[in-house]
Image (cartoon, helix red, strand yellow):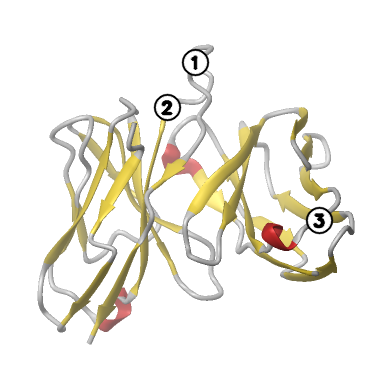
Amino acid sequence: KNEVEQSPQNLTAQEGEFITINCSYSVGISALHWLQQHPGGGIVSLFMLSSGKKKHGRLIATINIQEKHSSLHITASHPRDSAVYICAAHYGGSQGNLIFGKGTKLSVKP
Amino acid sequence: NAGVTQTPKFQVLKTGQSMTLQCAQDMNHEYMSWYRQDPGMGLRLIHYSVGAGITDQGEVPNGYNVSRSTTEDFPLRLLSAAPSQTSVYFCASSSPLFSSAFDTGELFFGEGSRLTVL
């Protein structure tokens, strides 16, 4: 069974800290999504990547295909970054092959 | 563009009642899907569609029905609600992965529908 594992489950940081959230998956994938779920419940897409690294503002996502591992980094964290971060692995081209991790709940304290 | 519009945001049902969660997107996306989110679990796929007239089951399809008569709309029907269907439901849409330079496969989600079945 294809699985997606995230770590840590919960993360508390002080404002300004560098944060890393990890995601590992069991077999080869075609792409991996990083999503952010706000305390109010809405889900937004942060990154979709199939190789290498992407950067958007203070967020950086990397993926290592050989090691079946992806990381989401947040530099200079801020309380507004507090949210649940979810990775989802795309096994094949259809949405039917999208497996989600359980999420990492991040709390950034001022 | 409105993106993905999902209604209602909240609904309380009695066991055995039926209802439809509506989902509409205005991005001309081929792919649409329904997920449920329960505490301590990741999003789980209920049903999905790869285009008008084409639907398929996901991981947890029992008790739900879908249809895709147009590209824009993908309603989810609860046939006879049960307490186990108490959950938060999300609709999502996307274009195919890598089929063209413009198809990024980025996921767009509705705001969610919180359903309680008593």
Q: Amino acid at mark 3?
A: Ser
Q: Whole-percent x and y of residue B37?
A: 44, 65
Q: Amino acid at mark 2?
A: Ser
Judged from the image, the secondary structure of the residue bearing numbered disc 1 is: loop
Q: Amino acid at mark 1?
A: Phe
Q: Whole-percent x and y of residue B68?
A: 18, 38
Image disc number at residue A77: 3
Q: Are marks 3 and 1 on the same chain?
A: no
Viewer-closest of B64 and A85? A85
Image disc number at residue B102: 1
Height in image: B92 above or below B81?
A: above
| Residue position marked by numbered label 2 in the rendering | B95
At a point 81% along the width and 56% down the height, the residue shown is: A77
Q: Is residue B105 left or right of residue B72?
A: right
Height in image: A61 above or below A54?
A: below
Res. B111 image quadrant: bottom left
Res. A81 image quadrant: bottom right
Image disc number at residue B14: none
Query: Farthest bottom residue?
Result: B118
